[in-house]
Image (cartoon, rainbow, N blue to C red):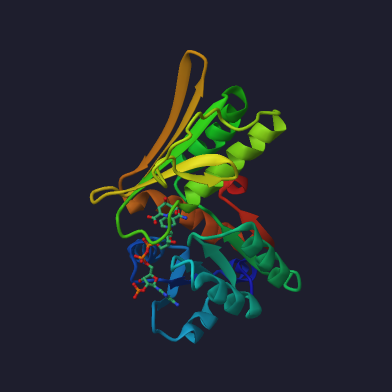
């Protein structure tokens, strides 16, 4: 049961949404419903029976970091491809997903820290700039109902920046702090300082601040509306059945 086959038979792709009553889930249901080539066949939230998703070819997961791994296991076991926006993916979790996919050559899983095209570019630009600046810090800003900090986007950006700095032979960003109120200098993610702000009125925003002698470079992205994530989600839904194995981020699809 793949998207390829579904399309050859002329039918729309059957899509399920997990976390369907959440902030992102509601938007995804609306976007899938509005797409002529996609058919919304299952909308599932907390307390609903997951087996309704068995009729889907692709399931989109926007739930919470504590339930997403169980969902993924269940879907992969049943040969269903998955698009994941839920945050909380460590390297260990990604390896576990790769392990589950090893015996499933027809199943694709795409996990993206951020489906906004601007956010994807912001991360690419940050990775490109990283080698030229001795200092870097990340400031992410989100709505106060967000469960995790720092955000998946900030964590992923920090990893990309850290890798680029290591490849360029850069050491830690200079910092003379010897006295600190705990948390004042943010969290360390792969050696990069990350600061998380939560405030009513915000949606999802991030700045990557680079510094070197006599100049700074700030790369900033703002999602003002969750509609910003939908083109990326739909792109992933359409392509994931043709991409067996694990795909990280939207970059390879653009
Ligand atoms: N990759 C990206 O581009 C983006 C990623 N995100 C991420 O997506 C995730 C969801 O964000 P958001 O929509 O704001 O969060 P919400 O809390 O609004 O939505 C999550 C939904 O999942 C439901 N849920 C909880 N457990 C289950 C379960 N076992 N099965 C099905 N549904 C379940 C929740 O129900 P209940 O409330 O009753 O617990 C809730 O309705 C977060 O991790 C966030 O960081 C968000 C935006 C963009
Ligand atoms: O919870 C959110 O809202 C968002 N979560 C993702 C993250 O953790 O990076 C993506 C975006 O920042 C919105």
Q: Residue at x 66, y 28 (%)?
A: 170
Front-lying residue, 243 or 124: 124
Q: Residue furthest left?
A: 201
Q: Residue at x 36, y 58 (%)?
A: 146
Above or below for 161 versus 243: above
Q: Residue at x 60, y 22 (%)?
A: 132
Residue 171 percent location from the top left of the image? 65, 31
Instruction: Tell how many labels.
Output: 0
- Quadrant holding the N terminus: bottom right
Residue 99 percent location from the top left of the image? 72, 69
Asked whether residue 11 is in view, the answer is no
Q: Residue at x 65, y 79 (%)?
A: 77
Residue 190 percent location from the top left of the image? 60, 45
Name the image quarter holding residue 251. top right
Above or below for 171 versus 27: above
Residue 73 percent location from the top left of the image? 61, 76
Name the image quarter holding residue 94. bottom right
Front-lying residue, 234 or 201: 201
Above or below for 41 versus 174: below
* Left or right: 227, with 81 as reference point: left
* Left or right: 29, with 70 as reference point: left
- Quadrant holding the C terminus: top right
Asked whether residue 124 is in view, the answer is yes
Q: Residue furthest front?
A: 179
Name the image quarter holding residue 41. bottom left
């Amino acid at each position: 049961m793949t998207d390829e086959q579904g399309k050859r038979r002329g039918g729309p792709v059957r899509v399920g949404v997990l976390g369907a009553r959440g902030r992102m889930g509601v938007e995804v249901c609306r976007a899938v419903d509005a797409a002529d080539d996609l058919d919304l066949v299952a909308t599932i939230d907390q307390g609903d029976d997951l087996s309704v998703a068995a009729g889907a070819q692709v399931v989109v997961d926007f739930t919470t970091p504590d339930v997403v791994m169980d969902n993924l296991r269940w879907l992969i076991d049943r040969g269903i491809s998955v698009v994941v926006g839920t945050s909380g993916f460590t390297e260990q979790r990604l390896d576990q997903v790769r392990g589950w996919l090893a015996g499933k050559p027809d199943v694709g899983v795409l996990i993206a820290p951020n489906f906004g095209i601007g956010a994807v570019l912001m991360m690419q630009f940050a990775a490109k700039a990283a080698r030229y600046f001795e200092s870097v810090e990340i400031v992410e800003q989100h709505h106060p109902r967000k469960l995790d900090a720092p955000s998946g986007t900030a964590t992923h950006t920090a990893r990309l920046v850290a890798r680029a700095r290591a490849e360029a032979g850069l050491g830690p960003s200079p910092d003379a702090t010897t006295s600190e109120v705990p948390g004042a200098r943010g969290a360390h993610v792969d050696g990069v300082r990350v600061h998380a702000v939560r405030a009513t009125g915000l949606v999802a925003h991030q700045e990557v601040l680079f510094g070197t002698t006599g100049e700074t470079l700030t790369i900033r992205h703002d999602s003002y509306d969750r509609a910003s994530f939908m083109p990326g989600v739909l792109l992933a839904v359409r392509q994931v059945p043709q991409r067996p194995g694990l795909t990280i981020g939207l970059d390879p699809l653009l």
